[in-house]
Amino acid sequence: MDLSHLILDDGINQREVFLNHPNKALHIVPGIWREMKDFSSGSICLVLASINYSEKDYMRDYDTFLNYRKNG
């Protein structure tokens, strides 16, 4: 059975978080790389943000992220 989970990475440490409690939420602060894994077809991911979405605000390449964290 696949379990929905995230891999969170600050550029130094990685942590795996399983999303197996529907009554709990996960707050991810800015500057964290995240990978979503094994989400089932019935899963829902809700994202709340304080500003409107802009593609230019997001890094899509892990090496770019590591460079940002190192030199940020």
Image: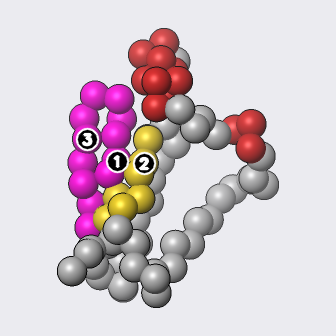
Prevailing SS of the magenta stretch: strand
- Range of residues picked out in magenta: 7-18
Asked if the stretch drawn in magenta spans residue 61, the answer is no
Distance (Cα) linking label 3 and label 1: 6 Å
The furthest residue to the left: 1
Few, some or many C-alpha atoms within 10 Å of disc 2 (few <14, some 14-19, many ≥20)? some
Confirm or deny contact between disc 3 and disc 2 (CB under 8 A): no
Q: Tag 2 or tag 1, which sits nearer the N-term?
A: 1
**Amino acid on which the number 1 mark rests in the picture:** Leu
Asked if the stretch drawn in magenta spans residue 16, the answer is yes
Q: Of helix, strand and loop, which one carries label 3?
A: strand
Confirm or deny contact between disc 3 and disc 1 (CB under 8 A): yes
**Amino acid on which the number 2 mark rests in the picture:** Arg
**Amino acid on which the number 3 mark rests in the picture:** Gln
Few, some or many C-alpha atoms within 10 Å of disc 3 (few <14, some 14-19, many ≥20)? few
Distance (Cα) linking label 1 and label 2: 5 Å
Instruction: Give coordinates of residue 3: x percent, y percent.
Output: 27, 74
- Write down the quadrant of residue 18 in the picture: bottom left
* Relative to 25, 50 lies left or right: right
Q: Which residue is mark 1?
A: 8
Instruction: Give coordinates of residue 44: x percent, y percent.
Output: 51, 79
* Relative to 12, 39 lies left or right: right
Label of residue 41 in the image: none
* Relative to 49, 5 lies left or right: left
Residue 69 visible somewhere in the drawing: no
Q: Of helix, strand and loop, which one carries label 1?
A: strand
Q: Which residue is mark 2?
A: 34
Q: Which residue is mark 3?
A: 14
Q: Tag 2 or tag 3, which sits nearer the N-term?
A: 3
